Image (cartoon, rainbow, N blue to C red):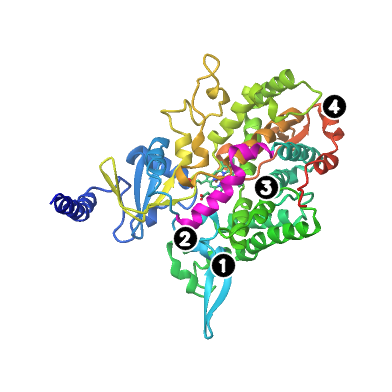
Amino acid sequence: MLLFGLGTFAVIAMLLYFFWCPKSARSLPFPPGPPRDPVIGHLRYMPTKNRATVFHTWAKTYGDVMYLDILGKPTIVLNTARVAVDLLNKRSSIYSDRPRFTSYELRVWLGTVKIRPNRTISRTGWATTLSLMPYGRRFNLHRQLHQSYLNRRKCREFKPIQTLEAQSLVKNLLESEPLNYSKMINRYESGVIAQVVAGHKICSDEDPYMRTTQALMESLGRSGAPGTSRIDLFPFLKYLPKWFPGSESVALARDCRPILRQLYEFPLQAVQKQMEKGVAKPSFLLTQLDQMGERVDFEDIRWAAAAMFGSTQVWSSLTVFILAMLLHPEYQYKAQREIDAVIGTSRLPAFEDRDHLPLVESIMQETLRWHPPTELGVPHRLMKDDVYQGMFIPKGSTVFANIRAMSLDRSIYSAPESFFPERFLPKPAGKEEPRFSSAYGFGRRICTGQYLGDQSLWIGIASILATCRISNVNDERGNVIVPDASTIMRTSHPNDFQYIISPRGPKAEELITEVNLEAEFSSLPSANLA
Ligand code: HEM
């Protein structure tokens, strides 16, 4: 009898849930948003440039959670860290999928497979690289692969590599023509990743890892962020001929294929060859190949490694740091005085100094906040209908965390447009404002490279400040050219601007020329494969 009663109760509860809850949720209003057109929704108003900043402006009218309808596709923009934490962190079990974008699929195309004698299908790899992978079993496996090698504790082991790469960076900057500075900073980020992923040292721009990552960046830059291109809005364009207006973005996305293919194949092959010869250095690929079991196959290892290569955020942030030092030279001098007082001038910075250099730390944290390198994050996708603060958010919504808007939140940061590192220092010298953790994203999709990126950024900034003087260039008449941040920072990655990097003094130059990087790098541990 009791069982019968419980059974009846369960059936009624389920019926109520299916018939009453979803209906009542669907009768709630969508989050507010700008006025829209019939059928096409907000398509006409969607900004093609500076989207994060435009959304931030709209948020002043429509609020922290904004609803946009793009050709019937619901899109949600979260404009404060509070709402992003509420939804993407606290409800991460339903907010951790990624939307499918045609531009992703066209980029990551793996060729055709014959499934029957007279039938072949295209294999797109959109589901194979972690940052684009749908939520599910394979996603969990790839996250585990990343986290097992990039967690906070494991990343401590990479400090010697990062320190030497940062010393290579300043050496390269001091020896380069200004036109090549950006390349050198990119080489630094790619250099750390190539070491960690494949145990490989990048020595020149002709290096295969360098060429491939650079080609990837250029190609991604040309085809735009996924979700913004025409083929994402009109996927049918991929079936139309090249001359059809609007289908240029299809060709641009397809340009990426051979590059991504190389990134996917080359590192694993290279490490396998080194293993055969017994010369492989410790790396993510070596560890995974060594431990490979039934759960993980070559395909998983290849793609998990390739997903680490595409990162450009350290490159962007170091460039933003340089821009900040040009616009606020006082911080350059103050931080250099701090370094001289703590480290002296007879050695280069090391990670052990980090806790003793509060201003250098604050400059790094403020760089991430002042212009976060990923302004709109990577979009999440909602897997179930949801209700938040009386608003209905439909299943399948594309959800953007507007990281740029979060960095400008006046209820958290005073004068948020200003570069003001002391905001993070304790009172009374500072304002004890919280560090900007939103830069790394949210929930189960939070950046897997956050500890590696944090370390690369810190040692990069500390090494540049300790050894280099960053200065403006002069025009033909001798007037100083001060860069204009508003035109340079139109996207997450700064546009080119002019500056000069010179040695801070004879002592710094001596330190950099004295260090024998080749010997230091070769003294890093080799893997014992015996
Ligand atoms: C300053 C450095 C970095 C910043 C600010 C940054 C920021 C971000 C952000 C905002 C996301 C999107 C998170 C979300 O969807 O909520 C992300 C994802 C990701 N990042 Fe980073 N990143 C940095 C460095 C790196 C590095 C060095 C690597 C590689 C070793 C990396 C690998 C990834 C991967 C694989 C994802 C996708 C995670 C997933 O979809 O589950 N990132 N990053």
Numbered disc in front, either 2 or 4: 2
User: Who is closer to the viewer here, 296 or 201?
Assistant: 296
Q: Give the mark nearer the N terminus: 3 vs 2.
A: 2
- Segment tinted magenta in the rendering: 134-158
- Indicate the amino acid at tag 2: Phe
Q: Which label is found at residue 193?
A: 3
Instruction: Tell me where residue 522 sits by quadrant.
Output: top right
Labelled pair 3, 2 in contact (Cβ < 8 Å): no
Q: Which label is found at residue 211?
A: none
Helix, strand or loop under label 1: strand
Helix, strand or loop under label 3: helix
Disc 3 residue: CB within 8 Å of ligand 1: yes
- Indicate the amino acid at tag 4: Pro
C-alpha separation, residue under disc 3 versus residue under disc 4: 32 Å
Numbered disc in front, either 3 or 2: 3
Numbered disc in front, either 1 or 4: 1
Q: Give the mark nearer the N terminus: 3 vs 1.
A: 1
**Number of other residues with Cα within 10 Å of mark 1, as a class: few under 14, some 14 to 19, many 20 or more:** some
